[in-house]
Image (cartoon, rainbow, N blue to C red):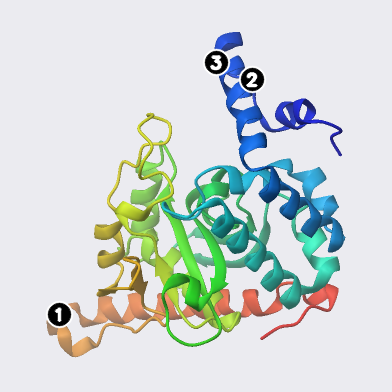
């Protein structure tokens, strides 16, 4: 563990951009350490009391989420702390301490794998790390071993997302492709019976929600995105999440303005398409059902080797 704020800064900063830029980031870092001292102390105390300090040693940035934009814009520092600790409470309660510690060690763990049209597709889950402001976990879709798409997610009490009732819901803070994969996306779309990979990533998220007993799936709105108020090129959002969620089946928004996603995938009925296209639709539906079932089984087995609770 670090012994002072300077050591923590060096552990969490890449020192990019030269001395001047590094100095600016260091000053901002020290200022945030002062402004959010009580919140930082609360988070550190939580990790220490839950025997989770090993996670901070692996990823010191876990301590700092309350000091920057987190999950969606408009959250104050106390609510950011509340949301982060609510996720950790839920995760440890479901999977128990041994698996929680083990889960954060590798970059990601395999959940599901299918082969179709001589193409291999993998679904993997891991800590969000580089996408930390947008969620606590990252679900990824790989094609023949190459990362194609990813979604940064978190699990929160339903009421924190503006949903009625008890239970927990899945929050999608990021859903995007990877740079320079245009040709790979075309290849994957062809292999997936002319279905865009994003629909399969959503199916994986729906399987996760079902396996974990979650009561809803909520996608971040354009104006609510964690980086909505950022203007730097590196943080600027170059896509419309409002349009994306509607393309993926969202038809209504929550009281907070986020998008309510379908919790369960419903295959398109064959009678809705021309008779000459029904065989192709049947193949697509069968493939998506196989993919969803495989993901569901994988999420149900996650953590079983550590004796965790499986819903």
Question: What is the x, y in percent for residue 122?
Answer: 57, 60
Instruction: Report the residue at 40% width, 55% height from top.
Output: 188
Quickly name the residue at label 1. 276
Q: Which mark is residue 13?
A: none
Instruction: Report the residue at 48% width, 66% height from top.
Output: 171
The disc, 1 or 2, on the residue closer to the chain's N-terminal end is 2
Quickly name the residue at label 3. 21
Instruction: Report the residue at 57% width, 69% height from top.
Output: 155
* In this view, the mark in front (2 or 3): 3
* In this view, the mark in front (1 or 2): 2
10 Å crowding of disc 1: few (<14), some (14-19), many (20+) = few
Q: Looking at the picture, does residue 195 appear above or below residue 94?
A: above
Question: What is the x, y in percent for residue 199?
Answer: 37, 66
Most foreground residue, 88 or 174: 88
The disc, 2 or 3, on the residue closer to the chain's N-terminal end is 2
Q: Which mark is residue 15?
A: 2
The disc, 3 or 1, on the residue closer to the chain's N-terminal end is 3
Label 3, secondary structure: give it: helix
Q: CA distance from mark 2 to mark 3?
A: 8 Å
Q: CA distance from mark 3 to mark 1?
A: 61 Å
Asked which quadrant contains residue 214, the reply is: bottom right
Classify the position of the N terminus by image quarter. Answer: top right
Q: Looking at the picture, does residue 122 appear above or below residue 130?
A: below
């Amino acid at each position: 563990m670090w012994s002072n704020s300077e050591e923590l800064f060096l552990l969490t900063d890449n020192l990019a951009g030269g001395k001047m830029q590094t100095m600016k980031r260091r000053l901002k870092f020290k200022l945030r350490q002062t402004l959010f001292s009580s919140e930082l102390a609360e988070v550190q105390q939580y990790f220490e009391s839950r025997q989770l300090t090993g996670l901070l040693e692996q990823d010191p940035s876990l301590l700092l989420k309350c000091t920057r934009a987190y999950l969606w814009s408009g959250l104050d520092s106390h609510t950011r702390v509340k949301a982060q600790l609510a996720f950790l409470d839920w995760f440890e309660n479901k999977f128990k301490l041994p698996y929680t510690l083990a889960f954060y060690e590798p970059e990601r763990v395999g959940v599901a794998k299918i082969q179709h049209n001589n193409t291999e597709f993998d679904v993997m889950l891991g800590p969000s790390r580089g996408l930390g402001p947008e969620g606590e976990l990252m679900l990824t879709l790989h094609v023949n071993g190459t990362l194609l798409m990813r979604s940064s997610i978190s699990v929160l009490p339903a009421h924190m997302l503006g949903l009625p009732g008890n239970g927990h819901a899945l929050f999608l803070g990021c859903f995007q492709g990877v740079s320079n994969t245009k040709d790979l996306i075309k290849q994957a779309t062809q292999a997936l019976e002319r279905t865009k990979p994003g629909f399969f990533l959503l199916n994986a998220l729906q399987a996760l929600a079902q396996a974990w007993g979650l009561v809803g799936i909520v996608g971040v709105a354009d104006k609510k995105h964690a980086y909505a108020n950022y203007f730097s090129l590196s943080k600027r959002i170059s896509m419309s999440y409002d349009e994306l969620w509607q393309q993926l089946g969202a038809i209504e928004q929550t009281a907070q303005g986020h998008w309510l996603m379908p919790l369960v995938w419903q295959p398109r009925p064959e009678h809705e398409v021309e008779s000459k296209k029904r065989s192709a639709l049947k193949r697509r539906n069968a493939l998506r059902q196989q993919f969803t079932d495989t993901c569901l089984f994988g999420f149900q087995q996650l953590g079983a080797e550590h004796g965790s609770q499986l819903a």
